[in-house]
Amino acid sequence: MPTDSEGRRRIVYCVGEERSLRDVLPESEAAALLAAASRAGLRGVRVVDPGGMALWGSGDPGPPPGEGDPRRLILLEGEPAGSVVLSAGASRGETQDALLALLADTLTAIAHTNLKRMLTTETHTEVVNRSYEELLETNRSLSASEQRYRELAGTLEVKVRERTEELTRAMAQLVQQEKMASVGQLAAGVAHEINNPLAFVTSNLRTLKKYTERFLDIIARYQRVFEHGGVAQQDRDDLRKHRESLRLDAISADAGDLLRQTLEGTERVRKIVADLKGFSHIDEEGEAPADLNREIDRTLSVMTHEIPAGAAIVREFSPLPVIPCRPGAFNQLFLGLLRNAFQARQEGLRVTIRTGVSGDRIRIAIADNGPGVPADLRTRIFEPFFTTRDVGKGKGLGLTVAYDIVTAHGGTIIVEDTPGGGATFVLQLPIRRGDHDKIR
Amino acid sequence: MIEYDSEEQRMILKFVYYGPALSGKTTNLLRLHDLLAKEGRGDLMVLDTKDDRTIFFDLLPFFLVAPSGLKIKVKVYTVPGQVQHDATRKAVLQRADGVAYIADSRRSEAKNNAESFGNLERNLSIVGIDIDKLPLVIQYNKRDLPGILPEEEIRKAWGPTGFPVILSSALEGWGVVETFRTLAERAYDALDRRHDFAGTHGLTRESFAGRLVRRTG
Ligand SMILES: Nc1nc2c(ncn2[C@@H]2O[C@H](COP(=O)(O)OP(=O)(O)O)[C@@H](O)[C@H]2O)c(=O)[nH]1
Ligand SMILES: [Mg+2]
């Protein structure tokens, strides 16, 4: 199929094919007419082409027609396409002349009619065929575009799946954040509730300590007075016996320790409550400058009960630059990673937290000596609800949340092998972030 | 040009009367058939079927011989104007040597005219004919009717294109021969450039157009 200057396929079809007298005058029709003419008295008549070659004759014997023989033209589309001619020696006259003219006109008319029929058929066939070809061509290009759309639909499916996963993850993270927020609020509320009685308990204890010191002081004075006479021996003995039975000496020695320890206890409660508030960052909204070393410590302090007995927690902290971030989010992140590490093994657990700066990034590695993460699962563990642990134990969201928080901060998180066995989660966070990376 | 057989000394040319349905294309050929001498032309072939709208097309053939002996057949076709006959239009338009675009002068037909001319432009590009190189004549027909576009408006619209514009009433028989002659002359110029009609074949513009437009009587 020919193409145009721009390489497009062009449909080429054209009607009006040139035809000769033979094409438009079938011998059957011409011969019958010539025979009839012959019977009517036009003997020795022939049809010749423009070159003078005889095409058909009436079947009568006679010499071939010559130059001077009477003839009439047969016209095809105005062009002389042949003639009817009487051969030399044939009988001539007015009748023959009239018959010759009639024969020529009849053959011209038959040729015209046949040509018209052929042209009609030709056009019809041509148009139908070419329309069919055009249809085929259209069909071809449609199939091609259909193929393209199918491929597109295929990738679309993948895209949709990816987006759905992303959405599921975002949704899950939202749920988790919501949960953390309400936990944080609860913690902050509880902390507030505890703070009030704790404050007066502490204050009262301090007062009580002072009072006790005064009681003991006066008791000691009374005792000295008793010891140095002025009181009947009998009374002295009774008092000494009673003092001994009350074990007042031991109690006096103990009371100070007791109160001091109790105050230490309330101080610890106060600190825990403060940490709880700090961890939840309930008072802060949006980004704030944070020292991640301090945040890790805060997280550790609220997780003490989750640390398995006998576990060794090694803090290898290097000073970190303060970076703007959502500390609450980062504490969630550390909580998730530390919890993961604490669950890595029951006995002989050793968790090493190493922080430092490498180039323009903060690097935080949390290494455990558990079973580690098989290579083929290393990307999957960040997927929502993916967990290698028994159902019910790991929520399967901690690492996803960690991944999302780190990514939102323009950082990366990967898992590696701990030398000697175990998993090491490595966070890398840019110290400076571009504006477009600002957390939403 | 459709065919040129240098050995046989034959050339077949194709002129096409294009335009919207019922603008008077067939009437143009009927009038030419009546007005021009029988000598050098064939009979009008009207290939229509059901109604008076041309289903296929009309054909009026002309025949002339140049002084060099070159036989030239000129086939003048009309195309069906109806939308559904676009395939036929393309087939007829293929390898055209000249086009007469027949518009209906009535204001009410302006939209049909524009659509049909747009169709002509599109089909010319489909069959690979450059409209800027094609001998093209514009005829505004049915000037005998009321409600027609005034001449100055037509001239203003077509002036910038450079195409000759001829006013006519095919029904009354005027402007028809002029259209055909103008088309023949324009086609001659294009053919002369390619085939050296004047030099090689001794065929002047005047004699070419004159042979085609031979009036009766
Ligand atoms: N009044 C008037 N009618 C015309 C003229 N030319 C054609 N017609 C009529 O318009 C109708 C369609 O004409 P026709 O030649 O068949 O149109 P075609 O479809 O372009 O071939 C016919 O009824 C013609 O008689 C004209 O110049 N004036
Ligand atoms: Mg018509």
Image (cartoon, coloured by chain):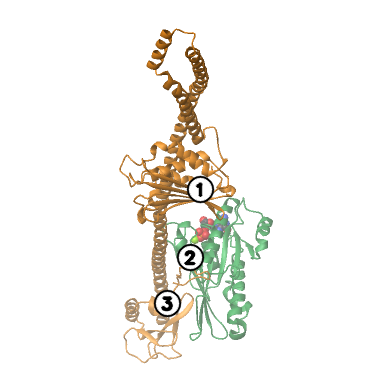
Q: Amino acid at mark 1?
A: Phe
Q: Split into 4 quadrants, where in the image is the N terminus of chain A?
A: bottom left
Q: Which residue is mark 1?
A: A317
Residue at 40% across, 82% down: A96
Q: Colour of chain A?
A: orange
Q: Which residue is mark 2?
A: B90
- Image coordinates of residue B4 in percent, x first then y, are 51, 80
The label shown at residue B130 is none
How many neighbours does mark 2 have within 10 angstroms: few (below 14), some (14-19), or many (20 or more)?
A: many
Query: As rendered, which of A420 and B60 lies closer to the eye?
Result: A420
- Image coordinates of residue A253 in percent, x first then y, are 45, 23
Q: Chain of mark 2?
A: B
Q: Is mark 1 within 8 Å of ligand 1?
A: no
Residue A247 appears in the picture as rendered: yes
Q: Is residue B24 left or right of residue A140?
A: right
Residue A89 lies in quadrant:
bottom left
The label shown at residue A19 is 3
Q: Are marks 2 and 3 in contact (CB under 8 Å)?
A: no
Query: As rendered, which of A409 and A134 lies closer to the eye?
Result: A409
Q: Amino acid at mark 3?
A: Arg
The green one among the chains is B
Front position among marks 1 and 2: 1
Under tag 1, what secondary structure?
loop
- Image coordinates of residue A250 in percent, x first then y, are 42, 22
Residue at 35% across, 86% down: A44
Q: Chain of mark 3?
A: A
